[in-house]
């Protein structure tokens, strides 16, 4: 259970929220019918918060890191990163929500020096106020309604408690439950949602963040424990109470080929609205001291154009602008009058082009990079040895901050920089799946004609197996199938040294014990790395196979040659027909990775 709100707590919440958002991304995309039914709200929220977490990872704790100042600094980094990397309407609003949270916590830290549960309620209220101020025309039945309900419930609980402040879990749970109740009501607040039989996609994303918050401050694992009534929103499938059964999307397929395809058209929404809906989305960052004047001018332009969804997020001289327009030219010219816009993107809202204006006001096509023939493999590499290995095999190795998988922003940039028509992304652990799929979806929209496949490797040894069978001369589909089959046919295990005492599936582990993983479960506990390696290999080769792959880490704790020789001798004694290959991966946190093909 959370005892203090500090920088570490904020970082834990951010990481858990990003993972939960990744698992819910496709579900949220499927709910997206307002303000534009383009099926990307989940992806935009994920990409925005992934950029926020990337900024947080790059931000060291403040020198005088008290609990309160550490939390304020972490939230500020999230807000800055989200503003810099905001995608779409929902992502821009999310950036402003984070700015409200950060500003309130910073003020509380400065005035009181500590963060009590009342500060959580106040932070939610300030986030609500900041988001509503940023949106030119707030609409009920959206993520704004869900945030408002959460902030109101938390504030009322604190007020009712009086001088005796309620505990953190009670405040977080009140906010979570109120958000879920508000989410269920959104279906009847907007005609577009009622016609489609769904709740608001952005509101669903808000619930993900609050679900994780309630779980963490209550001392629960947000991946495994569901709070009462609503449950944690961390699955890829929508709740049947929120999405009609006939609209439930299918689960993620083993191989995901990203090719241009039409979006699902919700006829009840588009039948009456297509004629007047703007067809282009304009997004940019700008540094200006005249934000109010710029906003007033954009509101005037938006009204004259028939546009909508104007959001001006940010503060302290830096702002993210988002708006839907028929013609973005006047808005861009206005931005140039007030500052220097950058990261400017104009995206076609493909399903919602103004059909009545199309003949007389055909906008200039948005320029996209010229793609050349060819195929590139992007591979997640957790250590320098793996990077070298993948590079020698012809792949482009990528690693994220702190030894984590590459972020969606890194992957999106890498896809763009390849400049080729065919890209294969190979992941190397479960945590890397969500950013890979999000980056693939984003690239599919930004680069018409590109073909992207994600090979869902859950371990580095599966990535090694997939890249080993990559053949650029094969047809794209055949190459993807072969790589996916190789990854899927590789059973994986690993060793990890326990940092603390813990209960596991194999019994009680003490700090310093070696945990032997097979797939994703702790299968055994050993005293040394060598003992654990032999025990894990014994179990894995008992089911047969052709080859054992060993990838040694940076903290192996004994000579690499001694370990490899011992494991090879044990494998050949048990299975003389099998081969053993070893690589120095250099990954941290995992002394040894084991694969059996």
Image (tube, rainbow, N blue to C red):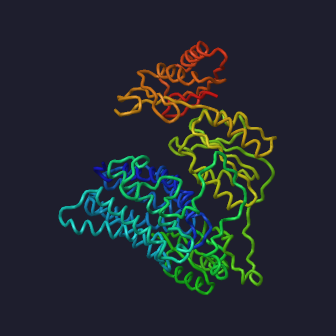
Q: Is residue 326 above or below residue 574?
A: below
Residue 34 image point, x, y percent: 56, 72
Q: Is residue 352 above or below residue 357?
A: above
Kindly give the residue lying farthest to the left in the view shown. 163
Residue beneath the point at 54% across and 19% down:
563
Residue beneath the point at 47% across and 63% down:
241
Residue 336 image point, x, y percent: 61, 76
Q: Quadrant of the C terminus?
A: top right
Residue beneath the point at 39% across and 56% down:
73
Which of the pair 98/284 is nearer the observer? Answer: 98
Residue 339 image point, x, y percent: 57, 74
Q: Is residue 24 above or below residue 331?
A: above
Which of the pair 171/112 is nearer the observer? Answer: 171
The image quarter in which residue 442 lies: bottom right
Which of the pair 255/464 is nearer the observer? Answer: 255
The image quarter in which residue 269 lies: bottom right
């Amino acid at each position: 259970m959370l005892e203090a709100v500090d920088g570490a707590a904020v970082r834990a919440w951010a990481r858990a929220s990003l993972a939960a958002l990744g698992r819910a991304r496709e579900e949220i995309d499927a709910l997206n019918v307002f303000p534009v039914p383009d099926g990307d709200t989940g992806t935009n929220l994920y990409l925005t918060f992934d950029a926020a977490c990337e900024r947080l990872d790059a931000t060291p704790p403040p020198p005088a890191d008290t609990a309160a100042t550490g939390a304020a600094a972490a939230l500020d980094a999230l807000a800055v990163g989200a503003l810099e990397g905001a995608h779409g309407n929902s992502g821009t609003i999310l950036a402003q929500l984070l700015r409200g949270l950060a500003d309130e916590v910073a003020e509380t830290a400065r005035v009181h020096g500590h963060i009590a549960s009342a500060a959580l309620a106040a932070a939610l209220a300030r986030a609500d106020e900041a988001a509503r101020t940023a949106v030119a025309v707030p609409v009920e039945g959206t993520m704004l309604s869900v945030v408002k309900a959460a902030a109101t419930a938390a504030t009322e609980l604190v007020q009712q408690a009086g001088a005796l402040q309620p505990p953190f879990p009670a405040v977080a749970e009140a906010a979570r439950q109120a958000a879920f109740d508000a989410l269920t009501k959104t279906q009847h607040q907007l005609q577009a949602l009622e016609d489609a039989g769904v709740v608001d996609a952005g509101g669903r994303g808000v619930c993900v963040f609050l679900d994780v918050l309630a779980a963490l401050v209550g001392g629960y694992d947000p991946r495994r424990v569901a709070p009462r009534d609503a449950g944690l929103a961390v699955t890829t499938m929508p709740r049947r109470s929120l999405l009609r059964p006939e609209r439930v999307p299918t689960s993620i397929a083993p191989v995901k080929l990203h090719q241009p395809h039409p979006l699902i058209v919700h006829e009840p929404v588009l039948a009456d609205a297509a004629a007047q809906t703007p067809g282009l989305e304009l997004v940019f960052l700008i540094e200006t001291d005249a934000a109010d004047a710029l906003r007033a001018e954009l509101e005037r332009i938006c009204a004259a154009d028939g546009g909508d969804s104007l959001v001006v997020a940010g503060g302290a001289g830096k702002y993210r602008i988002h708006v839907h327009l028929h013609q973005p030219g006047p808005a861009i010219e206005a931005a140039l009058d007030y500052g220097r816009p950058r990261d400017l993107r104009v995206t076609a809202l493909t399903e919602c082009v103004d059909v009545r204006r199309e003949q007389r006001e055909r906008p200039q096509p948005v320029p996209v990079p010229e793609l050349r023939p060819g195929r590139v493999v992007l591979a997640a590499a957790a250590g320098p040895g793996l990077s070298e290995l993948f590079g020698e095999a012809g792949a482009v190795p990528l690693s994220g901050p702190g030894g984590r998988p590459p972020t969606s922003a890194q992957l999106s940039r890498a896809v763009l920089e390849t400049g080729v028509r065919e890209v294969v992304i190979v992941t190397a652990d479960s945590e890397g799946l969500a950013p890979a799929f999000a980056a693939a979806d984003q690239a599919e929209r930004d680069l018409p004609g590109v073909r992207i496949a994600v090979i869902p490797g859950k371990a580095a040894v599966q990535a090694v197996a997939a890249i080993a069978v990559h053949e650029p001369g094969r047809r794209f589909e055949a190459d993807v199938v072969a790589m996916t089959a190789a990854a899927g046919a590789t059973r994986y295990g690993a060793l990890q040294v326990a940092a603390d005492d813990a209960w596991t599936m194999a019994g009680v582990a003490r700090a310093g014990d070696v945990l032997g993983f097979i797939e994703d479960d702790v299968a055994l506990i050993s005293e040394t790395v060598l003992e654990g390696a032999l025990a894990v290999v014994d179990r894995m080769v008992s089911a047969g196979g052709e080859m054992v792959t060993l990838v040694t880490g940076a903290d192996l704790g004994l000579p690499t040659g001694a370990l490899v020789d011992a494991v090879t001798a044990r494998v050949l004694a048990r299975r003389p027909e099998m081969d053993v290959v070893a690589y120095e991966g250099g990954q941290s946190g995992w002394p040894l990775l084991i694969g059996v093909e």
